[in-house]
Amino acid sequence: MKKIFLMMMTTGALCAGCCDKERERAEFDYNVEKFADLGVLRYQVTDWDSLSAQQKAYIYCLQEAALYGRDILFDQNNRYNLAIRRTLEAIYANYKGDTATDDYKAFEVYTKRVWFSNGIHHHYGEEKFLPEFSEQFFTNAVCDINPALLPTRSGQSVDDFLAEILPVMFDPGVMTKKVNQDPNVDVIVASANNYYGDGVTEKEVEAYYNALKNPKDLSPVAYGLNSRLVKKDGKLVEEVYKVGGLYSAALEKVVYWLNEAQKYAENEAQKRATAALIAFYNTGSLKTYDEYAIAWVQDTESLVDYVNGFTESYGDALGIKASWEAMVNFKDIRLTKSVKILSENAQWFEDHSPVAQQFKKEKVKGISAKAITAAILGGDCFPTTPIGINLPNSNWIRKEYGSKSVTVTNITDAYDKAAAGSGFADEFVCCPKEKELMREYGSVTDNLHTSMHECLGHASGQLLPGVDPDALKIYGSTWEESRADLFALYYIADPKVVELGLLPNQDAYKAEYYKYMMNGLMTQLSRIEEGKSIEEAHMRNRALIAHWALEHGKAENVVELAQENGKTVVVIHDYTKLRDLFGQLLAEVQRVKSTGDFKAAQNLVETYAVKVDPTLHAEVLARYKKLNIAPYKGFVNPVYEAVKDKDGNITDVKVSYTEGYAEQHLRYSKDYSDLPTYND
Ligand code: ZN
């Protein structure tokens, strides 16, 4: 629940002190390709050459471990994803027909979308996207290739295979949503993800996991995190993700490369954490997982670090099951400095927040914050990826051992560079003053907001004794993101931030305020299809904050949705009062979280964060279309090549940036694809 994604197109302004890097990168091509509503970018692994041979070898092994989990995520997202992806890839590689037809072009787009979304459902909107080629075209293409190349079940005829997968691909009524959050339906039955077996209901899941929880346990494991819950002979049983269990073939490879990485580890702390992770994959024990999380959070000195595991639970409507993800990274020494200042002052921020005393942490412990350079993205961090991460997710571990918080600077950088010159600011930003502020301070406030969200926001506040951390249920993720965002919004305008040297003056924060309101009220609607409402937790959180502030500032005309030359624009009349409103909402959001006030959370989210004004929505979509900007972005990874001596030791690693999007996915599906097609 602790991930932050890119908020919107940034203006392309450069942060201070980046000019050298700038010249260095002038030749780098950040934009790879565009299809449907998706844009593929490339990121650069800044300062790769500053690493030692040992560090490079370490990263090499870890990135292999990061790539081997890709199939797991496909299968978690939907049990037909691997069958469909492998069929598409078989056609892609063996198609003998005319590639200039509309059907074939639509086939290519669909295949690229399946790679991008790690399955047949939109990675962000969660709804199934339908092929724009005909069922007949697909059937012919399948029948034209050698049946041995198709991922049929054993003994299954091609006809039976088609009968099984055609409705999954083409019928809009089948497996419609990956995650369904509609409070009026059974969210487990109505979700097409693969975390629960056939016939398992929401009530049964809640009863099953509630029975495992002991309210007196002060260090509870994350029950259900690494398993699929299925019904066997009428009884619920967990199929655990582990070596020898579910997803074994992929996890064996992950474990192999984690073991290889141990040869090149920088220090004992790193080795200890990796050893615990390996033990977790081998046993599936959630106690061991917590031991790993503690060892990992205690390793703050290493230059290289990584995430590899079943981590975030956005993909499960009840937030119990975690998707597999990976990111390997190393410290961005230059930018870590400013993040460090925040973390050193964490207690001051906690003490001075507008939150009621009993909901504050007396001691904000061990917030370790840094800026990092991503070296590889895998699983649920690929191709779309967060720009900030705060882990581990376990509440008691965070309280006792702290958490690690990072902002991923080379990814933010790639977004900025790719967006420069898109015309976005000219189209949507209302006034010359705001345009100027965003050009000047857009990048620096964006990074600062992310850092504050991660290293102060998520770390702040406490639950009252006995309050269930899952009390807000389906509103939990939205609520947690709102809390972190509000903390950052409230403080980015504080004079303390200028005093600490994090912003150059007392006006800069307005760039972030303007951008946030414009995004929450308007521009993020570009990511939603006409007629749909807001589903994703981060989008809901931004809508919640922006609409609440608009509504509660009405009497004093703090913010306004105005008309300018026939276009809707956000106008902020009073930045100081807007900050007060953020402070008021922060106090309420923390109260609700601390006391587990489900009704209040439900009321605010359903009132402000879900519904979309259809007229404004249509306007935003039309204006966006004119700009021809893809609303969602994802990445192509760099390619690493190891140089080995005669004993097989890695002596150097070369990085290159020339691999294309389709090329990369086809290679991953060939070289890193050990899972069976059917894991049921
Ligand atoms: Zn967050």
Image: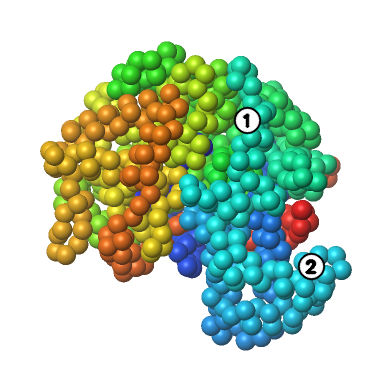
Q: Is residue 48 above or below residue 365?
A: below
Q: Position of residue 134 (x, y in %)?
A: 59, 80
Q: Nearer the viewer, mark 2 or mark 1?
A: 1
Q: Using the rendered image of the protein, determine whether residue 267 is visible from the camera's viewpoint.
A: no
In the drawing, does residue 386 fall left or right of residue 504?
A: right
Q: Position of residue 87 (x, y in %)?
A: 70, 69
Tag 1: amino acid: Asn
Q: Please tell me which residue is depicted at 61% across the width and 37% down the height of the picture.
A: 206
Depth check: 415 or 478 in front?
A: 478
Q: Is residue 242 above or below residue 153?
A: above
Identify the residue under disc 2: 152
Tag 2: amino acid: Thr
Assign a secondary structure to mark 1.
Answer: helix
Q: Residue furthest right?
A: 155
Tell me which colouring the rendered structure shows: rainbow
Give the CA separation, mark 2 to mark 1: 39 Å
Depth check: 538 or 205 in front?
A: 205
